[in-house]
Amino acid sequence: MNIDAFVNANDSARIYECTYYHDPTRWNSIPKDTKEILTSQKWSGYIKYLDPEGNVSDAIKNLPNNEGGIYIFFIQGPTLPSAEMYIAYIGRALFTDGQNIKKRVSQYNRESKRNNARPKISRLFRHWKDYLYVKYFSTKDNELIQQGESALIKAILPPFNDDIPEKIEFKQARKAF
């Protein structure tokens, strides 16, 4: 059976549809110095976001509260965990008196349940809460946090981010044939 026929016949599959953009020109557009910093940072391992009862996991509660950083939410499927990993959302937590990486990452579960929650965040938790993982790196360098988050979002365009930092140049579509 053709995959498209299966998906069209099974409307529930459309609920879980996400659009991903894999564009090497955007990946390669990250400035070299920013790319070197991002790849040299000590990123955490993958951390399950929620515990079996649906609460923020102890591992998330143990994130650093004395630094800011960049964090990435992943949807990780159970069939082939090493291959079914999708970047869903990229965010940042500046290091200030009122904000840190632990506080910011911990807020998403509560935020997803509010009546005025961001629709994409609400959808992310509604459909994939059991498969959400986080990876992060922490730093006190707020400039690096802002540049790094911006570069990653522009390079990847995660499906659950609403805003694209700064401006991305889009090319006009052309006919293929």
Image (cartoon, rainbow, N blue to C red):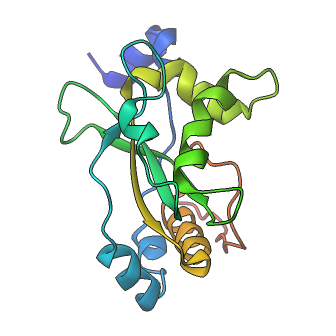
Q: Can residue 34 be seen at all in this image of the molecule? A: yes
Vertical arrangement, residue 66 with respect to residue 102, above or below: below
Which residue is pictured at 72% across the width and 73% down the height? 167
* Nearer to the camera, 107 or 135: 107
Quarter of image, res 123: top right
Which residue is pictured at 46% across the width and 51% down the height? 72
* Nearer to the camera, 45 or 7: 45
Q: Residue furthest right?
A: 116
Instruction: Tell me where residue 24 appears, x and y as whole percent.
Output: 39, 70
Q: Residue furthest bottom?
A: 33
* Nearer to the camera, 161 or 62: 62
Vertical arrangement, residue 96 with respect to residue 85, above or below: below
Quarter of image, res 100: bottom right
Vertical arrangement, residue 120 with respect to residue 30, above or below: above
Which residue is pictured at 57% across the width and 60% down the height? 175
Instruction: Tell me where residue 11 appears, x and y as whole percent.
Output: 51, 10
Instruction: Tell me where residue 109 appears, x and y as whole percent.
Output: 58, 29
Say whether residue 53 is left or right of residue 112.
Answer: left
Say whether residue 44 is left or right of residue 160.
Answer: left
* Nearer to the camera, 152 or 172: 152
Q: Quadrant of the N terminus?
A: top left
Instruction: Tell me where residue 165 appears, x and y as whole percent.
Output: 69, 67
Q: Can residue 177 be seen at all in this image of the molecule? A: no
Vertical arrangement, residue 167 with respect to residue 112, above or below: below
Q: How many marks?
A: 0
Which residue is pictured at 41% across the width and 89% down the height? 32
Say whether residue 7 is left or right of residue 164.
Answer: left
